[in-house]
Image: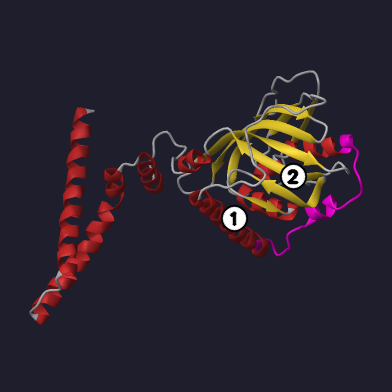
Amino acid sequence: MLAVAPTQHAACSPQAMWSSRQRTARPVRLVVAAQAAGGGSSETSSSSSDPNPGLGLKAVWHGAEALGNVIGAQQQLAGGSKRSSSASAAAGGARLTREQAIAAIKEDYSKNYFVSGAGDLAAYTPDCYFADPFAGFSGTQRFKNNVSNLGSLMQDIQLDITGWAEGERELVTKWRFSAILDLPWRPRLAAAGGTTHVFDEDNRVVKHIESWDVDPARVVRSLLKPSAKVPTTFAEVLCQSLHDGDLTGVWFCFSSGVLKAAGVSSIALLLLHILRGEGQGGWEAAAYLGFVMGLGTEMYKVVRSIGGGESG
């Protein structure tokens, strides 16, 4: 069991244990306990080495990678230094013993490598194949870049290792993790699943197959939900309404802005109507309608707030 807690140790089995501190601005205590099951692999969620998600999930993955690349470029400009390629360099070394490979992977897990990108990935080949429910690609450095870039958005990371089974040609882990994303509405990203690390004859990882125990689409949808129990900011209220499918709530978020824009437009179009002696047809009607709807909604908000205050 790997547990992340600021002040206390987690219970762990007597078979094996290692600990370290996460190298981030928010240091946390990591305690990992692993059980080795020789001669076979543990059960894990079904996963394909050639994932074929829907177009929506693929779009989400490519969008996240593009966002990560932008973040990474900004970090490089701010830091004035080129990204290190230590992962690829480390992965190109000589043959490892199985014990060395397992030790290196344990070290990666202790650093939350697939969440933060902080691990060295020294047991991986440079062209290792990485797959998850969203996409699959080859390249250890690309994987490290992706998780490093997006990991910079994550706060309050908690990673628990719930299973560890060493087979003849693979290591299968089970895990669950959660983190708060540093976005305006501060959503919580949480998932549970497993990772299969496949070794070659040199005991280096050539496949890293990740599976989730929850529908990935559900996880993506949950990113609209703020972590705050009671949304207070504009971004939190808007995203909570979108998550719940509350179209009225979405309209309430924009009604004041619509009222202002429609009010200015209505005055301008009215003056233009007077000067030219003719209206602007649909544009004028839309502006008037937006003004009336916005004004009505804002008046309703005021009445509701007064009624709520009196009843409270």
Q: Are marks 2 and 1 in contact (CB under 8 Å)?
A: no
Look at discs 2 and 1 and give the one toward the viewer.
Answer: 2
Q: Residue at x 20, y 54 (%)?
A: 294
Left or right of 115 in this view: 37: right
- Residue range in magenta is 78-100
Separation (CA) of disc 2 from disc 1: 20 Å
Q: Vertical placement of 166 versus 126: above or below?
A: above
Please give the residue where the numbered disc 2 appears in the rendered image: 207
For label 2, the SS is strand
Q: Vertical placement of 246 versus 77: above or below?
A: above
User: Is residue 226 visible in this depiction of the protein?
Assistant: yes
- Residue 65 marker: 1
Q: Amino acid at mark 1?
A: Glu
Q: Residue at x 29, y 45 (%)?
A: 247
Q: Residue at x 90, y 42 (%)?
A: 96
Q: Characterize the local packing of mark 1: few (<14), some (14-19) or many (20 or more) Cα atoms within 10 angstroms.
A: some
Q: Is 19 a magenta residue?
A: no
Q: Position of residue 297 (x, y in %)?
A: 20, 48
Q: Quadrant of residue 199?
A: top right
- Depth check, front residue: 22 or 163: 163
For label 1, the SS is helix
Q: Amino acid at mark 2?
A: Lys
